[in-house]
Image (tube, helix red, strand yellow):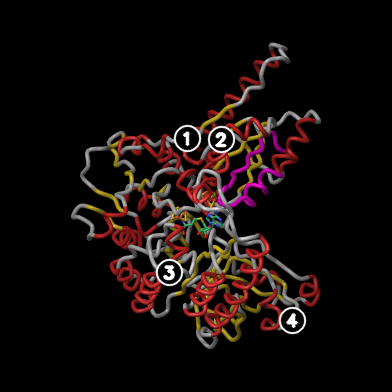
């Protein structure tokens, strides 16, 4: 069977798609590049904002047109939108044959198989009036109720464990994601993730370290550890719960646990980072996302300082620069506490880079609240922030408790105004690197139209392999290799031609930075490496 799989949303979803691909490939399914050739079309969806859902739904609509025209396809909706919308989605989109939430992806082969068999049977019976077979696997509230035991029985762990370590299974063979925590317990009032991904569950450190080792053996130079609040990783040893004699995943300890130092016999996030760093000397870069600005202990900063291959990069979303808004968001910290956290980071790691996310137009956000967010972006050295307009999500506390009272044009205006402030901050952060020499992990190539300092700012550099721009630059034969520093700053280095630029993909080289733009450093390879 030929399968087309398209992914929307975050890195967690990208990893899920990689695991789904590995699992179905092992069963003989073949993956194709376009949906036109596919017999099974799968969309791994995101629900975090309405726009993310609309993108996936427009694909679902297109497949519906094909199915009504008589094409015999299986259409599956996977991921967070399947979980959030549930069977309502089946009612509104009858062309969808299967739904599979993020906590049930280990059951996907079974679901596809059920739909295939039932369809074959109903065709054999020649019973056109029979209802079309559909298959559904959703967690519903199950994962929220999960006890330690339920977490242990979590079939998802087997999906992570059965991962294919073949480098060609990864979009960029030199770079890999490793999940350390699933789900989230924070319940920020705007956010759908705790509802779609379920309760926070931590994977056993042995499983994680083993996975990192095997990825290193398969050529991974960069490993990114994933968790919604990655620094809340904590695993207690010596509990009786095992699965087939192996350690089992555990539900999170709750926020209160972070007021005290980890008890003896627990693996904290700092311990885990250190263990991985020591276990995989061939991995040049160990990084992690997303950091929760609270409970980010000095122990983690110390490990980052002591371990040269841990990236001094923090993606730690502030979300807002106003205490009143942060309280309504239930973020659990004040602006002052966020600033203290950032001060502590730079105290330990003067070379660190900081990035984050911000939401504009949260219910009740006044001009003064918004101005406070601009102030935060002016004061702190954010290399970049992803800026989002608040989008009310069904099932969240905010949609029930607060009217979405900031008009869309005001949200749009604030979004643009904040982007402009961020752009100034980004320019300052990047300019500070001019004249320095940095290690760059190259992963793309692009043609550029003129001298880098003139063109670079305007170009959407897509890191991850494929980005190339500008017919003008291609005609002139000007090429740059593109990659990232340890601190996730994008760097473009001038190269003789396209082949030379592509050849650097997947390698770490030194670059002397000689120019900067708000989102880019430009420079030249240090010769003789
Ligand atoms: N776990 C991460 C973020 C996961 S969602 C964290 O806590 O930081 C990624 C980002 O989407 C969030 O940081 C937030 O900025 C944004 N986001 C989440 N829900 C949103 C909503 N309803 N409207 C607009 N932006 C939202
Ligand atoms: Fe969502 Fe908050 Fe959890 Fe992040 S920490 S996933 S924003 S609920
Ligand atoms: Fe989206 Fe789910 Fe990730 S809602 S951001 S795909 S956790």
Helix, strand or loop at label 1? It is loop
Is 522 above or below relative to 130?
below
Q: CA distance from mark 4 to mark 3?
A: 32 Å
The residue indicated by pointer 4 is 450
Helix, strand or loop at label 3? It is loop
Q: Residues within 10 Å of mark 4 (few under 14, many from 20)?
A: some
Pointers 2 and 1 in contact (C-beta within 8 Å): yes
Q: CA distance from mark 4 to mark 1?
A: 54 Å
> Residue 523: where, in percent of width, then height?
60, 82
Magenta stretch bounds: 38-58
> Residue 448: where, in percent of width, then height?
72, 75
Residue 311, label in figure: 3
Q: Which of the four quarters of the rendered structure image does ligand 2 lie in?
A: bottom left
The residue indicated by pointer 1 is 140
For the point 53% across and 65% down, the residue is 358
Q: Nearer the viewer, mark 2 or mark 3?
A: 2
Q: Earlier in the sequence, mark 1 or mark 3?
A: 1
Q: Earlier in the sequence, mark 2 or mark 1?
A: 2
């Amino acid at each position: 069977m030929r399968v087309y799989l398209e992914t929307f949303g975050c890195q967690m979803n990208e990893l899920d798609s990689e695991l789904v691909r590995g699992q179905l490939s092992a069963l003989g399914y073949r993956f194709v590049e376009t949906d036109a050739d596919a017999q099974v079309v799968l969309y791994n969806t995101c629900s975090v904002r309405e726009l993310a859902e609309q993108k996936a739904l427009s694909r679902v609509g297109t497949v519906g047109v094909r199915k009504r025209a008589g094409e015999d396809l299986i259409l599956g909706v996977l991921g967070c939108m399947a979980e959030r919308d549930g069977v309502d989605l089946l009612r509104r989109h009858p062309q969808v044959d299967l739904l599979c939430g993020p906590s049930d992806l280990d059951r996907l082969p079974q679901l596809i198989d059920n739909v295939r068999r039932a369809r074959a049977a109903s065709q054999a019976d020649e019973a056109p009036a029979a209802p079309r077979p559909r298959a559904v696997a959703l967690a519903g509230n199950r994962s929220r109720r999960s006890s330690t035991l339920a977490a242990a029985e979590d079939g998802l762990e087997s999906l992570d464990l059965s991962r294919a370590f073949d480098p060609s299974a990864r979009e960029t063979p030199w770079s890999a994601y490793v999940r350390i925590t699933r789900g989230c317990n924070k319940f920020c009032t705007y956010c759908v993730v705790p509802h779609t991904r379920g309760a926070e569950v931590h994977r056993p450190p042995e499983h994680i370290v083993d996975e990192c080792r095997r990825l290193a053996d398969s050529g991974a130079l960069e490993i990114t550890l994933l968790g919604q609040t990655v620094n809340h990783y904590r695993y207690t040893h010596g509990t009786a719960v095992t699965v087939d004699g192996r350690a089992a995943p555990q539900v999170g300890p709750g926020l209160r646990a972070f007021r005290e130092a980890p008890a003896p016999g627990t693996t904290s996030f700092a311990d885990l980072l250190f263990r991985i760093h020591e276990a995989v000397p061939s991995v040049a870069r160990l990084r992690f996302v997303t950091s929760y600005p609270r409970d980010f202990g000095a122990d983690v900063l110390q490990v980052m300082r002591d371990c040269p291959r841990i990236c001094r990069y923090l993606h730690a979303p502030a979300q807002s620069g106003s205490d009143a808004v942060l309280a309504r968001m239930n973020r659990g910290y004040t602006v002052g506490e966020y600033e203290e956290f950032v001060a502590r980071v730079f105290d330990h790691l003067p070379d660190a880079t900081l990035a984050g996310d911000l939401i504009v137009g949260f219910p009740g956000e006044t001009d003064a609240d918004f101005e406070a967010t601009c102030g935060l972006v002016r004061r702190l050295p954010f290399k970049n922030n992803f800026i989002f307009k608040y989008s009310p999500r069904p099932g969240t506390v905010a949609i029930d408790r607060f009217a979405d009272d900031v008009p869309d044009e005001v949200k749009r205006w604030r979004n643009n105004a904040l982007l402009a402030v961020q752009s100034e901050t980004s320019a300052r952060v990047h300019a500070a690197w001019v004249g320095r020499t940095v290690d760059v992990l190259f992963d793309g190539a692009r043609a550029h139209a003129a001298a880098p300092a003139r063109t670079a700012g305007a170009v959407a550099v897509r890191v991850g392999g494929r980005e190339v721009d500008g017919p003008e630059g291609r005609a002139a034969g000007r090429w740059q290799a593109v990659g990232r520093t340890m601190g996730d700053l994008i760097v473009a280095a001038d190269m003789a031609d396209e082949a030379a630029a592509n050849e650097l993909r997947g390698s770490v080289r030194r670059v002397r930075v000689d120019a900067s733009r708000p989102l880019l450093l430009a420079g030249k390879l240090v010769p003789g490496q």
